[in-house]
Structure formats: C-alpha cells, structure tokens
Amino acid sequence: MVVVVLIGVLAMIGVAAFRKRVTASKATEVTTVIGALRAGEEAYKGENQEYLDISDPNAWYPSSTFNSDAISWSANFGTHVDGPGFQALNAPITQSVQYRYLVNAGSAGDTMPSPTGVTLPTWPTPADPWYVIIARANVDGDSVFSTAVATSFNHEIHVDNEGE
C-alpha cells in the first residue's frame, strides 16, 4: 500500500514538472519569433530607410483563429493576406507557432496600431520611424490570452498572462 502511495506522489510531481517545462517552451517561442521579426525589421530598414508595415488590422499571422493548434510559419506565405510581407522580412523562423502575430510600422508622427481585444501601453507620438510586434495566443485553450508586445523604442518584450 505504501508503494502505491509513493508512486502516486511521484507521478503528481512528475506531471507538475512536465507542465512547467511545457509552459516554459511556449514562452520561448514568442521571444524567439519576436527576436527574428525584430532582426528582419532592422535589416529591412537598413536597406530601405524605413520599417516594413506588414499587418492589416486584426489579420493575425499565420492564422486569425485563436486555439491551441500550432501552425507552420511558412505554410501561409502564399495564402494569408499578410504572408508576402512576413516572407519579405526573411526572418529565420522554422518551427510551427502557437502565437499569432501582427507587425505594424510607420513614420515619425504616425498613429500606433490598436488591434481589437489587445490592451497596449500608451505611447507618445513617435519622433522617429517605428515598428510594433504584437503576439497573442490562447495556448491552453481556456479563452485566456497571453499577449506579448515589442517595439523599436526599446529592447524589451512585455508579456501579459505568460503561459496562458
């Protein structure tokens, strides 16, 4: 009887540790993809003197469906309205992603994006060219979204509800 209890306790500890690893891997996706998109935007600006404005309002890439499915990053280059823009960034993203992404850019004085359902910080009117990368996911399927935001203003990634 004691052996059965011990096995049960060890199994519960193992499940908790596994869930912690899964959550950490999901957080790694968003930082990796945002980093690749940032590098793509900076390279594009280096060649064109402006950042690339890719996303139509609320046209999340690679899919506007928010569920826990992972989707191939490059599979929708030819079919998604924003696919050619993401392809033009030439970001080295090879894995499937659970987060959905928007990338908006503009010139000094342009209005910052405000996608539906996402609470963003209040930014001052930009004095220089800018970009904003927004990532959103319903990773565990419970309708609570994790959102990550990165900008050209600084090197931080702001994450709300990490692991959700």
Image (cartoon, rainbow, N blue to C red):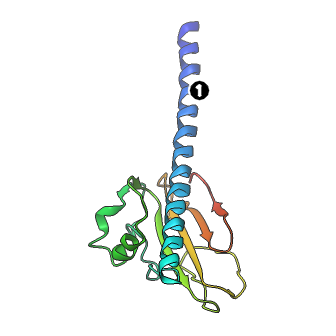
Vertical side of 147 occupied by 127: above or below? below
Q: Mark 1: few, some, or many residues within 10 Å (few <14, many ≥20)?
A: few
**Residue depicted at 46% across the width and 78% down the height:** 58
Q: Residue furthest bottom?
A: 109
6 vs 154, nearest the viewer: 154
Which type of secondary structure does the marked residue at label 1 adopt? Answer: helix
Q: Quadrant of the N terminus?
A: top right
Where is residue 140 shown, x and y percent of the image? 49, 51
The answer to whether one can see residue 98 in this image is: yes
| 161 or 54, nearer to the observer | 54
- Residue at coordinates 54% horizontally, 50% vertically from top-left? 28
* Residue 97 higher or lower than 20, as above or below: below
The residue that label 1 is drawn on is: 13
Quadrant into which the C terminus falls: bottom right
Residue appearing at x 51%, y 72% in the figure: 41
Across and down, in percent, residue 27 comes to 56, 51
The x and y percentages for residue 82 are 37, 77
**Residue 137, percent across and down?**
50, 61
For residue 74, which quarter of the picture? Answer: bottom left
Give whichever of 6, 164 is nearer the camera.
164
